Amino acid sequence: MSSKTKNEAHEVAEAPPVPAYSKEQYLTSKRFSPQERDILAAVLEANRSYTNEEAVAAIESYLRKDVR
C-alpha cells in the first residue's frame, strides 16, 4: 500500500509544457494588435521560440524604454 495521499501524488506530477511559438507565428496572430505585432517584429529573434508570457514581456519592455 502506498504511503502517499492523493494530494501528494498530484503535487509530484509535472506541469504540462508551455506552448512556444515562432516569431512568424506571432506576426500573423490575431491575439496582438497591429501595433503590438510591429513591436514584436522589431524585438523578437527569428530563430527562436517564445511563450505568450515572453512575447507580452518583450512588448512591455519595449514600451517602458526611455525616449532619447
Image: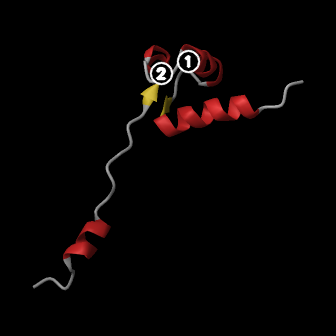
In the rendered image, the vertical position of residue 39 relative to residue 7, given as above or below:
above
Horizontal arrangement in the rendering, residue 16 relative to residue 3 (left or right): right
Compute the Cα span from label 2 to label 1. 7 Å
- The answer to whether residue 35 is seen in the rendering is yes
Rendered residue at 78%/32% (across/down) = 65
Horizontal arrangement in the rendering, residue 5 relative to residue 33 (left or right): left
Judged from the image, the secondary structure of the residue bearing numbered disc 1 is: helix
Q: Mark on residue 15?
A: none
Q: Residue furthest front?
A: 33
Q: Amino acid at mark 2?
A: Tyr
For label 1, the crowd category at 10 Å Cα-Cα, with few meaning under 14, some 14 to 19 and many 20 or more, is many
Residue bearing mark 2: 26
Q: Amino acid at mark 1?
A: Arg
Judged from the image, the secondary structure of the residue bearing numbered disc 2 is: helix
Residue bearing mark 1: 37
Q: Position of residue 68 (x, y in %)?
A: 90, 24
Q: Position of residue 8 (x, y in %)?
A: 27, 75
- Comparing 16 with 68, the one in front is 68
Rendered residue at 56%/18% (across/down) = 37
In the rendered image, the vertical position of residue 6 relative to residue 15, given as above or below:
below
- How many numbered circles does the render carry? 2
Q: Position of residue 57 (x, y in %)?
A: 60, 37
Q: Residue furthest right?
A: 68
Residues under numbered marks 2 and 1 in contact, where contact means CB atoms less than 8 Å apart: yes
In the rendered image, the vertical position of residue 4 relative to residue 40, given as above or below:
below
- Comparing 59 with 15, the one in front is 59
- The answer to whether residue 51 is seen in the rendering is no
For label 2, the crowd category at 10 Å Cα-Cα, with few meaning under 14, some 14 to 19 and many 20 or more, is many
